[in-house]
Amino acid sequence: MSSDDTTTSGEPTEASDFLREQIRADLSAGTYQGRVKTRFPPEPNGFLHIGHAMSICLNFGLADEFDGTCNLRFDDTNPETENEEFVRAIIEDVEWLGFTSDDEVYYASNYFGQMYQWAEDLINKGLAYVDDSDSETISEMRGGFTTPGQDSPFRDRSIEENLDLFRRMRAGEFADGERVLRAKIDMNHENMQMRDPVMYRIRNLPHHRTGDDWPIYPNYDWAHGQEDAIEGVTHSICTLEFDNNRELYDWYHNNIDLPFEKPNQWEFARLNLTHTVTSKRKLAQLVEDGIAAGWDDAIMPTISGVRRRGFPAKAIRDFCAHIGVAKSNSVREIELLESFVRDELNTIAPRRSAVLRPLKVVIENYPEGQVEMREAVNHPGDESFGTREVPFSREIYIEQDDFEEDPPPKYYRLTVGREVRLRFGYFITCTGLVKDDDGNIVELRATYDPETSGGSAPDGRKVKSTIHWVSAAEAVDATVVLYDRLFTAEHPTADGADPMDSLNPNAKEVIEGAKLEPSLAELPQGDVVQFERTGYFAHDLDTPMLFHRTVGLRDEWARLQKRKG
RNA sequence: UGGCCGGUAGUUCAAUUGGUGGAACGCCAGAUUUUGAUUCUGGAGGUCGUGGGUUCGAUCCCCACCCGGCCAACCA
């Protein structure tokens, strides 16, 4: 696999951090004969979330920068939770992020045979034994941080007996949980990971790739480092919480015959975001509880979710490059990610007109039945986007927010007696309003000034604001979904809190009957455009005329209102 | 409670490794603007966790303490 060449664009200066320093040091010292090989090793037990993007960009990015390679490898060692659907989704997400699989995809399950062989080697060296204890007993005998562990009564079995028992485990003679294979290290080690860790457990369960071939499955520590070694990985980069596992990682390597030089494990801080959770278990719960329609619902902080929502892959890559690799636990502000999304979308998204909450305006001095085409620029900052024509007529819709019967101070938009500019249209003056029996404003009356067709008045008079609109008869209807932060708590899991307690009931607002300019009926699904003045919107991947607001525009007026309380 | 990792603007990270601390986002103000957007300019904002020590000089080295994270699954 390799990344496309846009990955490192926008980062002209070579980044420097403890990982890159290390790689440069290894390179100049001639370690691994100048090879650099990394890997991204997801377990296929859920969809990738935004936190994984960091690891993906790091591993593939590093390989790219140092002329190395990066393997996409599925750490599929637990048949209880894994499946093919997750494998497919993960491959799709990695590719979408910009890292194409022009090479093969790797699977830990392909190495079960080799791992088994190495396990027998360890037994033969007297460094592994079969333990008949149940899991509670093993746990109790492991001791605690300040109390030593106790040797299992099965710890000193003969090599022959261990070999026989292990082969029978492999042959499927035992029930789940009946026996395990353990490394024989030190039951009084200060690092708990080293107190005779379990290498294999019995699970009489079909595996999505190996079927019923194996009744025993390797545990993480026994599997991971060996997978790295088999693939010739040089720099095995994982998150901080595996720090304690590094000693074990090394121990295994030091006690088996490696096909390549010993890989090294390095830890960096996982990416956490405010107001979101990045735990597969919690994400799975959102799906199970029906809060999300699926792992790829636009409300989800998964890669597939934010893709549906309209986040550009480049924005995510730039975001990851910007925050870099840290060695301390950190939580990034979701606003920072959004600012990268906004920044990217600002340069690539064509502008369109759409009225989310329509209020009809009848322009009384405009001829009935007449429709004229107005030229609108597709991007005010980039002429190459060209122009398009939008229909204008006597009856239009404007945003409900753009009219106030009793305007607060500094409100520049429409009110009775005030003149504003219609974007790409004329100046109009509101002359009156129509209310229903309940006192709701249902329609506005206005007049337009034909002299202002060019966007300004010949007499030089100014207007304070420009509002967007859509011609009523030609408008197309759409459903628009607005999103707010998923969790109201900044740190939803802080102090052991249940994130579900701070789930934002207003995280999703569905607006039916939005009025869009006609050209939007032809917008390809998946495309993202800017609805002028209201934000960036993605045309849903599956449902036509369903739009997700990717992110809003910066809104000075809203900020002003909020500040006033 | 033992081991390991970490503590630098509001926030998250930098600082070529002993020579009076930078960026981004956020915030504030101004300019431009047919999006209250974009763009541009400027500004506020720091007892480098605390206390000692070494040194001409410490964010950096040493010691102690405080705070946060991870580790006692047959999950990864």
Image (cartoon, coloured by chain):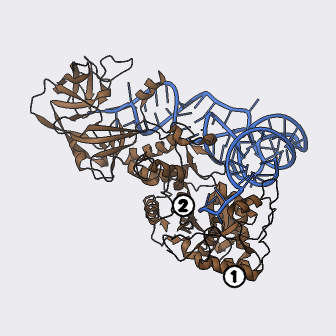
User: Which chain corresponds to the colour brown?
Assistant: A
Residue A187: x and y, percent? 79, 64
Tell me if A140 is positioned left or right of A414 in this view: right
Q: Is residue A233 visible?
A: no
Tell me if A100 is positioned left or right of A499 in this view: left
User: Which residue is at a point 74% across and 83% down the rendered structure image?
Assistant: A160
Asked if badge 2 and badge 1 are on a common chain, one would say yes
Q: Which residue is mark 1?
A: A164
Amino acid type of disc 2?
Gly
Tell me if A178 is positioned left or right of A547 in this view: right
- Considering only order in the chain, which callout, 1 or 2, is on the residue closer to the N terminus? 2
Q: Which residue is mark 2?
A: A61
Say which element carries label 1.
helix
User: Which residue is at a point 75% across and 58% down the rendered structure image?
Assistant: A140
Nearer the observer: mark 2 or 1; the answer is 1
Compared with residue A490, is residue A556 higher up or lower down, i.e. above or below? above
Nearer the observer, A403 or B53: A403
- The 10 Å Cα crowd at callout 1, few under 14, some 14 to 19, many 20 or more, is few
Compared with residue A548, is residue A203 higher up or lower down, i.e. above or below? below
Say which element carries label 2.
helix
User: Which residue is at a point 73% across and 61% down the rendered structure image?
Assistant: A137
Q: Quadrant of residue A505?
A: top left
Q: Is residue A564 visible?
A: yes
Amino acid type of disc 1?
Asp
Residue A204: x and y, percent? 56, 71
- Chain designation of label 1: A
User: Which residue is at a point 56% across and 54% down the rendered structure image?
Assistant: A13
- The 10 Å Cα crowd at callout 2, few under 14, some 14 to 19, many 20 or more, is many
- Chain designation of label 2: A
User: Which chain corresponds to the colour blue?
Assistant: B
Nearer the observer, A154 or A88: A154
